[in-house]
Amino acid sequence: MKTRANFPLQAFNSLNVPAVTAEIFLPSTVKELSEITTDKALRSYILGEGTNTLFCQAKAPTIIKPRLMGIEVTENDEYFQVSAACGENWHNLVLFCISHAIYGLENLALIPGSVGAAPVQNIGAYGIEVSDFIERVTWYDFAEKKLVDFSNAACQFGYRNSIFKQALNGKGIITHVHFLLPKAWQPVDSYQGLNTIISPVTPQAIMAKVIQLRQTKLPDPKLLPNAGSFFKNPLVTEDFFHALQQQYPKIPYYRQQSGEIKLAAGWLIEQAGLKGFRDGGVGVHENQALVIINYDSKHGQDIVALSVYIQEKIMAKFNLHLIPEVRFIGADGELSHTNRGCQ
Ligand code: EPU
């Protein structure tokens, strides 16, 4: 297996923050994965394409960056089953499916990151979440040194959440994701922006529109380093929402099946006057206030400081606590979002 010592991670995170790990493992097979000692594996951070990771300190923990590759398709009368290895690029998987006339994932086109990372935070966009199409996930258990299959229900998917981010965080690694895509395709085109597609509404037309919307609103990390949405959209109670709506009649909101109301964090940040705000080398994007840009800072701590400032402004104006979607990594591992002590 490929391993490297004192490895620089700046090119391995889309916020372009310099950080160095003492050791990085790059396993290409499950066998190579099993060669990493349990002790070491349990102290490592698993890095996909680094599009949702903020290195807060100059030093990073031991890294495991899986490179398992491959996509396999089987089918029955009703479904395609697509199994993809964790190291595949997410958007390439979407393109692969569309080019093989396997439809359903088109709304998730152009989301940065790897296949293995997709279930961890249950990526979602334009009306669907990846959990809508996951049949099961294969996960390698560091302590037991064996593969375990998790059914969709066992993954405990929620909004930007799953068991892999909660109880199983750091305890193993997703090796393969198995998708079930119905042959009877149903378009999901009600999200604002998609409902303007001129019929016939085809998977290709949805994908083209999604790509166009993302390219207009979301900055390219290669040009303006960022990690997509920095915060989750907050979920609030009906009562809390009604009070807010009295004060801000134009507030965008999305009613959830749970009865909660999802608010748009980007809108809240814009209302707080922070759209386009700059603080030294970091700032809030001019077109989408939910995105933090690292213009030219060399310190992850500058991004932490800006995110805390945004949280404070939102708390003061709306009495709401924004929770980062991005994962904060210190020298010794993941930091909880309430721990601001990383220097
Ligand atoms: N809005 C503003 N100002 C802003 C940004 C947004 O007023 O600066 C308003 C918009 O006008 C709209 C609402 O807020 O009424 C929602 O905005 P948008 O449709 O852009 O989506 P979002 O809620 O900001 C979420 C996801 C994105 C995903 C889009 C599209 C989260 C945290 N983010 O963003 O996911 O692409 O919906 O489905 O759920 C990501 O996770 O990295 C990501 C980009």
Image: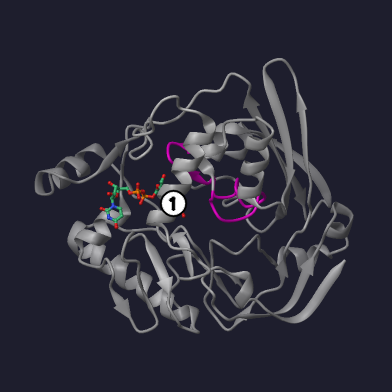
Q: In terms of image quadrants, where is residue 261? A: top left
Q: Is residue 232 left or right of residue 13?
A: left
Q: Which region shows up in magenta?
A: 110-128
The answer to whether 264 is drawn above or below residue 194 in the figure is below
Residue at screen point 25% across, 56% down: 268
Which percent across, then down, holds residue 136? 68, 35
Residue 280: say if magenta.
Answer: no
Crowd class of label 1 (few under 14; some 14 to 19; many from 20; radius 10 Å): some
| Residue denoted by label 1 | 214
The three-letter code of the residue at mark 1 reads Arg
Ligand 1 has an atom within 8 Å of the beta carbon of the residue at disc 1? yes
Rendered position, 161 above or below 190: below
Compared with 17, 13 (above or below) is above
Indicate the position of residue 279 as horizontal and vertical percent values. 32, 80
Residue 125 within the segment the image draws in magenta: yes
Which residue does the image show at 71% across and 51% down from the upper left? 88
330 left or right, relative to 140:
left
Q: How is the image coloured?
A: one colour
State whether residue 241 appears in this view: yes
Residue at the left extreme, as displayed = 246
User: Residue at coordinates 59% horizontally, 49% vertically from top-left?
Assistant: 120
